[in-house]
Amino acid sequence: MRARQTLAAAGLQEVITYSLIDPGLSDMLSLEPQAQSNGTVAIKIANPQSAELSVLRPRLLGSVLLAVRSNLRQRDRVLAFELARTWRGPLAPLPDERRLVAIVMLGPRRPRHFKVVDDSTVERSSMDDDNLDYFDVKGVVDALCSAFRVPVTYVPSHHNGLHPGRTAEVHAAGQRIGVVGQLHPAVAARFDLDAAPVLVAELDFEQLLQAREPLLTVQTPSRFPTADRDIAIVVAEDVLHADVEVAIREAGGPLLEHVQLFDVYRGKSIPAGRKSLAFSLRYRARDRTLEEDEVGAVHAGVEQALRTRFGADVRGR
């Protein structure tokens, strides 16, 4: 119920689909139908009522995409999810039965509304013409994981059926719990959803629950002032900002209260194959006001750690 309420609060509508699906639905989700991962083969029903409902669903994404396709006949923006059980073979001794969460989003970022152009003309418009993108669906996944106090990281990945370069695996507690990204245009076309980017996510809800923190830990806010610093570094293109953030937190120690990436830059002043990452850092002690020299020493240690670990060039130095 908490998961459903969180997703509904994010603007998504719940769909409920059949547990039995067409055996060809899994192939529609893959660019290479024969290249299916182990354990995802659908379980066939011995006495199906029809060929279109003859196997138990091993995934939810295909069923939600079909529901979205039906809804797009009446609207131009659909945000949908389903939380339900899936089944995977082999049958002996028992199939692997687990709950998944599937999310599908496409259309304008903001709902369209009516505006009066003059006294006699009314037309439909939207706040902007931008479509939903990867970061919108990632934000929904973040909200869902935060509701269960599960810190997650995103690792760039290749997935057979999703857009290359716009796909990431979701990791929690050192394990992969799902995938998030944009549906490959060729796959989207099979579902007649090629008019706008189709953003999808599919998470293992059982693993998400196992990774949640049992208790919420809170601390009394410090009453002493903060010392804010920015740092911009130039690193190789394949360096993940999440890894840089971890290194900053380790080097900053207990005095580092907050780290936030606020800029990624590639341009004339940056060599090819490299990028600039800019972070804001907030230092604060719980028992005293920090001196300038103390903050400077810790900040210098952060810069040195980034040079050593990533071969980073600190901009402005």
Image: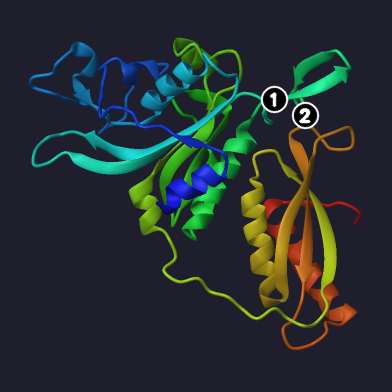
Depth order, front residue of 273/28: 28
Is residue 193 at least partly visible in the picture?
A: yes
Rendered image coloring scheme: rainbow
Residue at the image point whose x is 11% and y is 35% from the top: 91
> 303 above or below 235?
below
Question: Mark 2 or mark 1, which is nearer the start of the sequence?
Answer: 1
Query: Quarter-wise, where is residue 281 in the image?
Result: bottom right
Residue at the image point whose x is 49% and y is 20% from the top: 71
> 132 above or below 277?
above
SS class, disc 2: loop
Image coordinates for residue 176, horizontal then vertical, percent: 42, 46
Q: Which residue is mark 1?
A: 112
Image coordinates for residue 223, horizontal then vertical, percent: 77, 83
Depth order, front residue of 209/233: 209
The reply, left or right, for residue 286 in relation to residue 299 is: left
Quadrant of image for the C terminus: bottom right
Q: Three-letter amino acid code at disc 1?
A: Arg
> 193 above or below 143?
above
Is residue 34 at least partly visible in the picture?
A: no
Q: Three-letter amino acid code at disc 2?
A: Met
Q: Using the image, tell me which numbered label, if any, was put on residue 127.
A: 2
Residue at the image point whose x is 44% and y is 57% from the top: 173
> 284 above or below 125?
below
Depth order, front residue of 156/122: 122
Residue at the image point whose x is 80% and y is 82% from the top: 224
Image coordinates for residue 24, horizontal then vertical, percent: 29, 14
